[in-house]
């Protein structure tokens, strides 16, 4: 590691113009990254982390204004560089791993072409060599069968696979600086470890500098050399990662550590650590019960799945004629109970969830909801069933219409089912916003004017509009900072207890699962390999894959 910084941000000030006036977003930030160094930038949603990082590449969104300061990269002040100079640096000298792959990837281009495009734009390879190199990069990013992946479109990949494609694109030109904006938030812990190991090897072997924006303090503790904590547009604390996380000096840092699922990432809480708050949340129903496949069906069962199978046809030229995404999964969810599904990207978690709520049809197997076989329901009967099952998606950025106000988004299910008058729907929207602890003042705003945590609360409010019996949450907090995570998890636990909801919670974050769920099922390769009470499975895992997942958790947060 050399003495001088590769990236040196000095007194950076950025503001946004809005209908309410000019809002300061970054207030005099100083930050530097040296070659071969990983600097983690942490803070709550809206603290200015991504704004400061995106300013390095001149990628501020519409309304953003760089008001002062310097962004010096390799001796050049990018704050004063022209568009042509910045275009020459993006991708080649500075790689960006954005947070949301569904926004960052082109939906109508095949994956291989998108990876090769960086090499072609910067004239680093001819087209045949760029195509060959794209396969190598996909393999280095941990994607199995790169030839098959290269022929697919983004919507045909899982969320974790799409995130690995973004990593391959960012590293394609072997840049000197990588800005990683939540690069592993959508990945399971084993893939997360491989990706971070890969990025870490690049910093050591090639002297790549990494600015790592993350809400995961365990990742920061394990991977960063230095950490900077942002609050309200300012860096309130910075220094060597062990110093800051072991002995935080600022109240914001201490609050972030306290909000981290499982506790501080710098210490192992141990199996006997008191968890009174956790027990009060998970004891309502099903806590300590047997695994879903080990007890007979009873009156308390809301949903029962038996031997579910889902097969997808293969693509022309693939090595395998088809894929069995879900292979004989059986599970139960009781009323007022939270069942978590965990497993690596592509393990079948989301496909299982989509079958349970009949967003996709099973190839075989049986689904029983509230005592009724709903496996082959169609028409009006299926429409009626979907009123009682609601889905909260992973990305509030992609699942909320940017053109609608919050009031319109929340009341949309009521309009779809022709429930109530316009005035009654407006009143219901206000009531639902209050239930998810958002102020009525947000009703007239659009998603772009909300933080990530606020967007996810709006998505939950919309899901509650029709008074469902089952709520399916697919990675609902993976994109949120730890403070927003804690608030959303507390909210879901309260709603489950108050409304008697059955809750299926899909997550790659084992610390989050330990906080929210009463039972857990571990999936791998489309199969449910282990189920049981959360504390039992985490303390004494019986399957080797479960032990591998627990061993890969950064910072010891799931122990």
Image: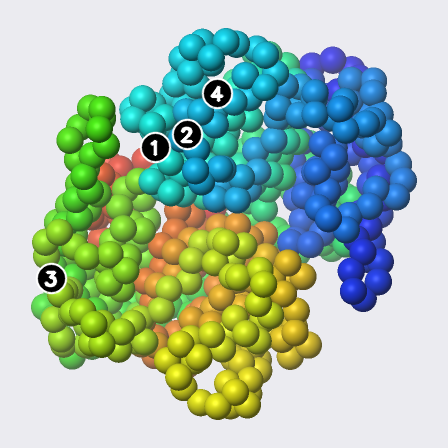
Name the secondary structure under disc 1.
Answer: loop
Nearest to the eye among marks 3 and 4: give it.
4
Q: Earlier in the sequence, mark 3 or mark 2?
A: 2
Nearest to the eye among marks 1 and 3: give it.
1
Determine whether 152 is above or below 85 in the image.
Answer: below
Q: Mark number for residue 152?
A: 1
In the rendered view, does 449 fall on the left or right side of 537? right
Q: Are dots 1 and 2 in contact, CB under 8 Å? A: yes
Q: Are dots 1 and 3 in contact, CB under 8 Å? A: no
Name the secondary structure under disc 4.
Answer: helix
Q: Residue at the spot x=13%, y=65% of the render?
A: 376
Task: Report how far apart the C-alphas of labels 3 and 2 lie in the structure.
Answer: 35 Å
Task: Report how far apart the C-alphas of labels 1 and 2 lie in the structure.
Answer: 6 Å
Q: Earlier in the sequence, mark 1 or mark 2?
A: 2
Name the secondary structure under disc 3.
Answer: strand
x, y percent for residue 550: 36, 41
- Residue named by callout 2: 111
- Residue named by callout 3: 366
Q: Residue at the spot x=12%, y=71% of the render?
A: 373
Q: Crowding at label 4, few (<14), some or many (≥20) Cα neighbours within 10 Å?
A: many
Query: Depth check: 508 or 379 in front?
Result: 379
Q: Earlier in the sequence, mark 3 or mark 4?
A: 4
Q: Are dots 2 and 4 in contact, CB under 8 Å? A: no
Query: Depth check: 280 or 326 in front?
Result: 326
Q: Are dots 3 and 4 in contact, CB under 8 Å? A: no
Which quarter of the figure has residue 413? bottom left
């Amino acid at each position: 590691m050399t003495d001088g910084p590769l990236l040196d941000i000095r007194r950076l000030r950025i503001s946004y113009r809005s209908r309410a006036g000019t809002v300061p977003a970054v207030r005099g930030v100083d930050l530097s990254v040296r070659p071969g160094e990983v600097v983690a930038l942490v803070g709550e949603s809206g603290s200015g982390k991504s704004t400061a990082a995106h300013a390095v590449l001149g990628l501020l969104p519409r309304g953003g204004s760089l008001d002062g300061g310097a962004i010096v990269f390799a001796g050049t002040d990018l704050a004063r560089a022209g568009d042509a100079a910045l275009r020459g640096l993006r991708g080649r000298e500075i790689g960006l791993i954005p947070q949301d792959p569904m926004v960052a990837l082109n939906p109508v281009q095949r994956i291989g072409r998108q990876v090769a495009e960086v090499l072609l734009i910067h004239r680093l390879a001819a087209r045949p060599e760029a195509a060959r190199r794209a396969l190598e990069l996909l393999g280095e990013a941990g994607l199995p069968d790169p030839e098959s992946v290269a022929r697919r479109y983004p919507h045909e990949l899982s969320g974790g696979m799409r995130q690995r494609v973004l990593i391959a694109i960012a590293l394609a030109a072997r840049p000197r600086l990588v800005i990683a904006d939540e690069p592993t938030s959508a990945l399971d812990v084993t893939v997360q470890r491989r990706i971070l190991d890969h990025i870490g090897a690049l910093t050591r072997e090639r002297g790549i500098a990494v600015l790592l924006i993350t809400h995961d303090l365990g990742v920061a503790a394990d991977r960063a050399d230095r950490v900077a904590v942002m609050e309200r547009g300012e860096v309130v604390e910075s220094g060597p990662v062990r110093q800051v996380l072991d002995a935080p000096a600022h109240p914001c840092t201490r609050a972030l550590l306290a909000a981290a699922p499982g506790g501080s990432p710098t210490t192992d809480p141990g199996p006997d650590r008191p968890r009174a708050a956790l027990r009060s949340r998970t004891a309502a129903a099903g806590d300590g019960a047997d695994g879903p496949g080990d007890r007979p069906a009873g009156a308390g069962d809301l949903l029962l799945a038996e031997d579910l199978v889902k097969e997808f046809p293969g693509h022309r030229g693939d090595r395998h004629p088809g894929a069995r995404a879900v292979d004989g999964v059986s599970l139960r969810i009781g009323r007022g109970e939270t069942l978590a599904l965990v497993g690596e990207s592509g393990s079948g978690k989301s496909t299982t969830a989509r079958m349970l709520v009949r967003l996709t049809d099973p190839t075989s197997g049986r689904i029983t909801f509230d005592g009724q076989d709903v496996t082959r329901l169609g028409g009006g009967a299926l429409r009626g069933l979907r009123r009682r099952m609601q889905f909260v998606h992973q990305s509030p950025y992609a699942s909320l219409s940017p053109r609608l106000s919050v009031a319109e988004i929340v009341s949309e299910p009521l309009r779809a089912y022709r429930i109530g008058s316009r005035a009654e729907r407006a009143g219901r929207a206000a009531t639902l916003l209050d239930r998810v602890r958002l102020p009525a003042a947000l009703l007239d705003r659009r998603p772009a004017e909300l933080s990530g945590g606020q967007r996810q609360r709006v998505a939950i409010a919309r899901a509650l509009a029709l008074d469902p019996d089952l709520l399916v949450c697919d990675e609902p907090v993976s994109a949120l900072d730890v403070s927003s995570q804690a608030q959303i998890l507390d909210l879901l636990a309260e709603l489950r207890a108050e409304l008697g909801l059955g809750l299926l919670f899909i997550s790659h974050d084992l610390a989050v699962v330990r906080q929210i769920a009463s039972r857990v099922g571990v999936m791998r390769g489309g199969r449910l390999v282990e189920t049981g009470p959360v504390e039992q499975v985490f303390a004494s895992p019986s399957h080797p894959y479960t032990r591998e997942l627990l061993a890969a958790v950064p910072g010891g947060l799931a122990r």
